[in-house]
Image (cartoon, grey):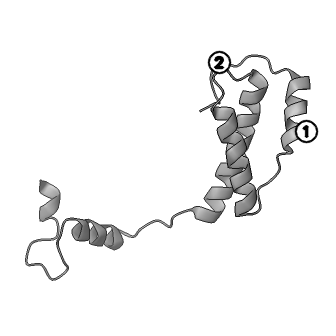
Amino acid sequence: MVGKSSRKTVNHREYSALVGKTVPRVIRNDSENEHYTRLLESLDSKPDPTPAEKELAELLTALIENFEEQHYALKRATPIESLTELMRASGLSSTSSERPASFLKS
């Protein structure tokens, strides 16, 4: 991914032109998120991005991450939910005669 490597001086004129072209702003819906994700993928696919392109990629990444954390964040599972999922994935049921933690020892 384009981003935090050794920092070179950003050409402000080039960066301003890129920002003027992409007009990055706070993402408010899925359509905007997809748009900025495509722009970021385009920057990431460049074999030798300029410092200005790296800077824009970093900004787009922050905007996308912010939107996705607010809209797609998974809720934390409780210990019981975690154990239930582990048991289900191991083929055990809550009525199994095996001790619940026995599958964790393998």
Mark 2, residues whose alpha carbon is within 10 Å: few (<14), some, or many (≥20)?
few
Dot 2 or dot 1: first in sequence order is 2
Q: Which residue is located at x 18 percent, y 70 percent?
A: 91
Where does the image place residue 51, in percent across and percent down from the top left? Answer: 75, 22
Q: Disc 1 residue type?
A: Gly
Reply above or below: 95 against 29.
below
Q: Which residue is located at x 46 percent, y 65 percent?
A: 76
Image marks 2 and 1: residues in contact by CB distance under 8 Å:
no
- Which residue occupies the extreme bottom position in the image? 95
Total tally of numbered discs in the picture: 2
Mark 2 vs mark 1, foreground winner is: 1
Left or right of 3, for residue 9: right
Q: Nearer the viewer, residue 100 or 26?
A: 26
Where does the image place residue 29, in percent across and percent down from the top left? Answer: 74, 63
Reply above or below: 40 against 81.
above
Q: CA distance from mark 2 to mark 1?
A: 25 Å
Left or right of 82, for residue 5: right
Q: Which residue is located at x 66 percent, y 20 percent?
A: 48
Q: Nearer the viewer, residue 49 or 70?
A: 49
Q: Secondary structure at mark 1?
A: helix
Q: Which mark is residue 20?
A: 1
Mark 1, residues whose alpha carbon is within 10 Å: few (<14), some, or many (≥20)?
few
Residue 89 quadrant: bottom left
Q: Nearer the viewer, residue 41 or 29?
A: 41
Q: Which mark is residue 81?
A: none
Q: Which residue is located at x 35 percent, y 72 percent?
A: 81
Where does the image place residue 18, in percent across and percent down from the top left? Answer: 85, 33
Q: Disc 2 residue type?
A: Ser
Question: Which residue is denoted by mark 2 in the rendering?
Answer: 6
Q: Secondary structure at mark 2?
A: loop
